[in-house]
Amino acid sequence: MITLHKVDQLRRQLSSWRLAGQRIALVPTMGNLHVGHLRLVERAKMLADRVIVTIFVNPLQFGAGEDFASYPRTLDEDRRKLAEYPTDLVFAPSVAEVYPRAQEEQTRVEVPGLSNILCGQTRPGHFVGVATVVCKLFNMTQPDVAVFGEKDFQQLLVIRRMVEDLQIPVEIVGMATVREPDGLAMSSRNGYLTPEQRAVAPAIYAVMSRIAERLRAGERDYAALESSAGRALQDAGLRPDYFQIRRVEDLLPPGGDDKELVILVAAYLGSARLIDNRTVTL
């Protein structure tokens, strides 16, 4: 497994693989890897000859007062984990390598509409940072396919829209959320939870599951279902940011004829902001 930190080194290595006719898969991460990330690597290897994992904590997607400075940076441990999986190359650039200009002078990529709702409403500029860094990573690596987890459902849709609108020749593959036995979605931010908070966190999945069953049973008062779920999360000890039922394809509020829905949740537990989602076919 190769580890590189400079774009010119990366491009030289990728050139040799392309000359050999090899298909390249990309798994972008911010590091602090868990089993969910490693499943993405396994999936990527099924889709390509070579797998690149990027590890980069992207300052552009963190807002004022968020956890950029304290976000875990565990490159050595991440490399040890990846060495046991089918990873050919780890690309771990510095902030200066990715953003050679000052952040306020950085060219940015914006996906209107999708970026300004849900997480984008409470984290202004977050998805501009996501779209910008993913576009840059695509330009640096020029992969044939890129694999993302569906836990960040809104992010996945933003990236799909960006790739479509900018005609970037990368196949985007989403992979189902990997969960703990009690239903909690695996996330690097779970590490922020105290043992007491960790015991509370599975309430997110439990509440989503109950709302999904009520939808499948025929309930269609979406506002009432959302309010009920918000109260249930509060009663469990969480502080909801939002609990929303939306259409899968564009995250707009569902209409009477919509059959493919997604439940999306963001809630605070201590210092951790946890997100999750669950799709429902009516």
Image (cartoon, rainbow, N blue to C red):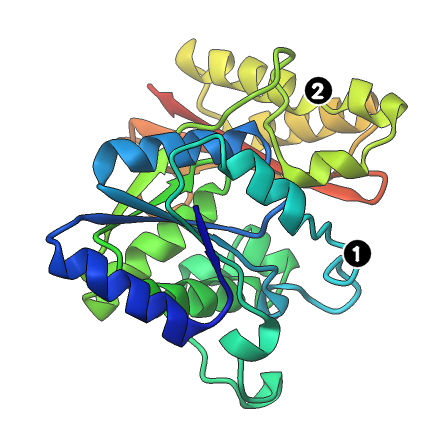
Q: Which mark is residue 203?
A: 2
Q: Which residue is mark 1?
A: 70
Q: SS for tag 2?
A: helix
Q: Nearer the viewer, residue 221 or 185?
A: 185
Q: Identify residue type, mark 1.
A: Ser
Against 99, residue 127 (above or below) is above
Q: Nearer the viewer's eye, disc 1 or disc 2?
A: 1
Q: Image point 55% across, 28% down: which residue?
A: 35
Identity, as a three-letter code, of the amino acid under mark 2: Ala
Residue occupying the point 62% across, 35% down: 187
Q: Is residue 221 left or right of residue 182?
A: left
Quarter the N terminus occupies: top left
58, above or below 48, in the image? below
The CA distance from mark 1 to mark 2 is 26 Å
Residue drawn 80% across the image and 64% down it: 65
For residue 270, side relative to residue 246 (left or right): right
Residue 112 in sight: no
Q: Are marks 1 and 2 in contact (CB under 8 Å)?
A: no
